[in-house]
Image: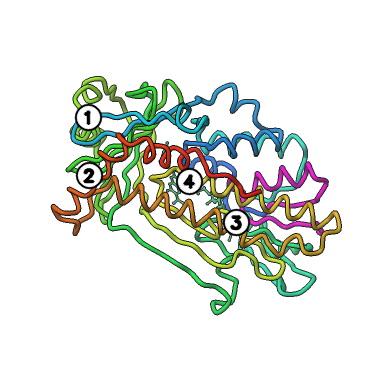
Amino acid sequence: MRVQIAIIGAGPAGLLLGQLLHGAGISAVIIEQRSQEYVLGRIRAGVLEQGTVELMDIAGVGGRMHREGLVHDGTELCFKGERHRIDFHKLVGKTVMIYGQTELTRDLMDARRALGLPTVYEAANVAVHDFDTAHPRVTYEKDGLAHEVQCDFIAGCDGFHGVCRASVPTDALHTYERVYPFGWLGILSDTPPVSDELIYVNHERGFALCSQRSTTRSRYYVQCPLDDKVENWSDERFWDELRLRLDREAAERLVTGPSIEKSIAPLRSFVAEPLRFGRLLLAGDAGHIVPPTGAKGLNLAASDVRFLWQALEDHYRGNQTALEHYSERCLARIWKAERFSWWMTSLLHRFPDNGDFGRKIQEAELEYLVHSEAASTSLAENYVGLPFGE
Ligand code: RFL
Ligand code: PHB
């Protein structure tokens, strides 16, 4: 098979890129190691920045998102048992959209199938070759048969554990990393959300987050030790712990029910530089990870894809240097989101070695944040998504 772009990975980055390239008349195949059902079964992000919403519209797949997604004008921060609202719309004139990564992925998969665009699921032993030459190749096996794809470029959209970044010679890559000393235990339940907006909680027992997928489906998280196991957490124990971390009104209003998903995610900050090696271009989690506290992971994947799609379109229109700035353009925005996610994480969690001094500093910063318009505006501006620098 020969295509212009071989996309590795059918997560949000790969699928969105595939859709945008199709709109630009650029041929692509997506090669994914898992099944479609497996990809859709992963419960992850839930908050879309306006820029991500716009990109879904440009890709022609925004219909259901606008019908079913919930527009949020602000969010709440809870500390010392009291909630404080940050009004994004009032402060920066923008909003966010609550629409689960699962739904966004499903819309992109459905659109791709309807257009008959080539996607290989359950591809084994995917390998990328010769990306430092003008003739890159991808090989994989499917149903026991070996396949080869020849292409102009390889888009590495294969997530943090993918093969693309791992195929780059280590001396060509600089990585930056911080691993946090706790995880998030999350559950999904078909219960009405405790509040109309998200609640981020700083509590002496640890961080908690009340999020949602719809008016009838909730997503809640509590900070837990890194070595904790899902098996240690019955639904009852989870609800009891969450209730303890909420303010009194929310604790009384919380509607509990059976969980339909429960998992523990570690928290990490990670950036690989650069994001381009010859004709291999990394996008999304393949190049960087943020802790979920700022709701930036999926949105960063979308912003890389925006830069990549535009650079590839320019390249095929004859601009021979269009791809040269891809990495630096992405990284400028990535590092700002890394900073914001690290800051939100530091502000809201209990760190084992922070001590009383650290706790007092957190409290002072939270007080400042909710009572200073300048500080609230800074949070709002970052949360809804910084500009693309265009
Ligand atoms: P994805 O979604 O990981 O998709 C990568 C795809 O590549 C496939 N793949 C391969 N395919 C072929 N060959 C190989 N060798 C391959 N290796 C991997 C994988 O099967 C997969 O289908 O990356 P992408 O597209 O860059 O999208 C990024 C987002 O998924 C990610 O940033 C967010 O979901 C991060 N994240 C969260 N972000 C938020 O904003 N809020 C959250 O609450 C939130 N929760 C999470 C998360 C990420 C998690 N991970 C990665 C463990 C919870 C978890 C558990
Ligand atoms: C979620 O709904 O899963 C979610 C929302 C906001 C975050 C992280 C996760 O910051």
Q: Position of residue 221 (x, y in %)?
A: 32, 39
In the current view of this chain or complex, which residue is farthest to the right?
318
- Would you say the residues marked 4 and 1 are in contact, meaning their CB atoms lie under 8 Å apart? no
**Mark 4 residue's CB less than 8 Å from ligand 1:** yes
Earlier residue among tags 4 and 1? 1
Q: Residue at x 45, y 67 (%)?
A: 176
- Work out how far the residue at label 3 is from the one at label 2, CA to CA, in angstroms: 34 Å
Report which quarter residue 318 is drawn in.
bottom right
* Amino acid of disc 2: Ala
Judging by the rendered image, the residue that carries numbered circle 4 is 296
* Amino acid of disc 1: Glu
Query: Mark 3 packing: few (<14 Cα in 10 Å), some, or many (20+)?
Result: many
* Amino acid of disc 4: Lys
Q: Position of residue 195 (x, y in %)?
A: 34, 23
Asked if one can make out residue 44 in the rendered structure from this viewpoint, the answer is no
Judging by the rendered image, the residue that carries numbered circle 1 is 82
Earlier residue among tags 3 and 2? 3
Tell me where the magenta segment starts and ends, as one range: 1-30
Earlier residue among tags 1 and 2? 1
Judging by the rendered image, the residue that carries numbered circle 2 is 364
Number of on-image labels: 4
Q: Position of residue 371 (x, y in %)?
A: 30, 34
Give the answer, above or below, for where 275 lies relative to 381: below
Depth check: give the residue in front, 35 or 366. Answer: 366
